[in-house]
Amino acid sequence: MIEVKGFSFTYPTGSRPALCDIGFEVGPRELCAVVGGSGAGKSTLAGVVSGTVPHLTGGTAQGAVQVNGRDLADTPLSGLVGEVGLVMQNPFNQISGARFSVREEIAFGLENLGVPRDEMVARIDPVLHDLGLAGVADRSPYELSGGQQQLLAIGSILVMRPTVMVLDEPTSQLDAAGNALVFEALGTLKEKGVTVLLIEHRMERLARAADRVLVLDRGSIVANGTPEEVLADERLEQWGVAPLRYTMAARRAAARGLWPARRPLPVTLDAAAAGFGETAGHPDRGDRR
Ligand SMILES: Nc1ncnc2c1ncn2[C@@H]1O[C@H](COP(=O)(O)OP(=O)(O)O)[C@@H](O)[C@H]1O
Ligand SMILES: [Mg+2]
């Protein structure tokens, strides 16, 4: 559970707040996506919820952030290990550099948590398998492709079984297959009751997987709703986020009376196909002369 209330934050060198008076909640079994243009404050928010901001960055903060009922201002970072997992934007920064193989790298966090050896082994293999890393388990983390490093960064957090998981653009270097593995893993986490905050710029998958979408614009939350409500909002582009092709196509069709009036604009392929199918079959569709 994540609860943020009236929270503002300014970096030590910042001339203006990176986050201004934000408030939202994400519950267990919920996947909340965060979108927004470059510099909107997404990574800062990831840091806030995982405790690195302001504990490691310094800077000034106001307001309250609670994770599983604990106030982060009063919780040392060490108290959050194993409870909140952060997958950072650049996977290279997350590799410990202290371990020689992918398998050992995934074990690293568990060693620090003091998990018994048998349990470590039992946890690691399924994670390697789920993320398609079983074939490279004995390779050095530095020999992996960018996409595989990204999967490794996710795996080394997943294996610790955090109850709150924060992912900062975890699929930026992944191909479609890798992307699908990550979203599958996130779906499984949700079923297990994990709270997921996902910063992501690939909208198609997000529109199907997210329960809720937050939009950050210059440090403020400007929208918070279902993917249908938020991603079809006509202000999306103003907020620095590219609308989905399905939505744009339907919006143009709607302007010519070619989108069923009672249907909301689509944010998924299925919803687009259903809406266009309906107009195509309609006897007095607007393109007849
Ligand atoms: N370590 C830092 N020190 C000072 N300013 C920072 C730091 N990190 C980010 N910022 C500033 O905070 C704002 C939000 O950045 P960030 O959270 O990285 O945005 P996003 O992830 O949405 O691109 C930007 O104006 C950025 O320049
Ligand atoms: Mg960022």
Image (tube, rainbow, N blue to C red):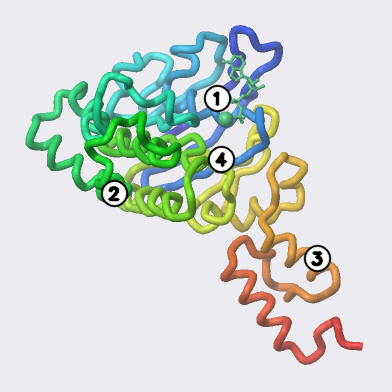
Residue type highlighted by circle 4? Val
Label 1 CB, ligand 1: below 8 Å?
yes
Write down the residue under mark 1: 44
Write down the residue under mark 3: 252
> Which of the image's four quarters has the N terminus?
top left
Residue 254 rendering spot, x and y as whole percentages: 79, 69
Instruction: Tell me how far mark 2 sits from mark 3, CA to CA.
Output: 41 Å
Q: Residue furthest right?
A: 289
Residue at image x 53%, y 28%? 45
Where does ligand 2 appear, by image quarter? top right
Write down the residue under mark 2: 192
Residue type highlighted by circle 3? Arg
Residue type highlighted by circle 1? Thr
N-terminal label among 2 and 1? 1
Q: Nearer the viewer, residue 46 or 229?
A: 46
Q: Tags 4 and 1 in contact by the CB under 8 Å rule? A: no
Residue 115 rendering spot, x and y as whole percentages: 14, 29
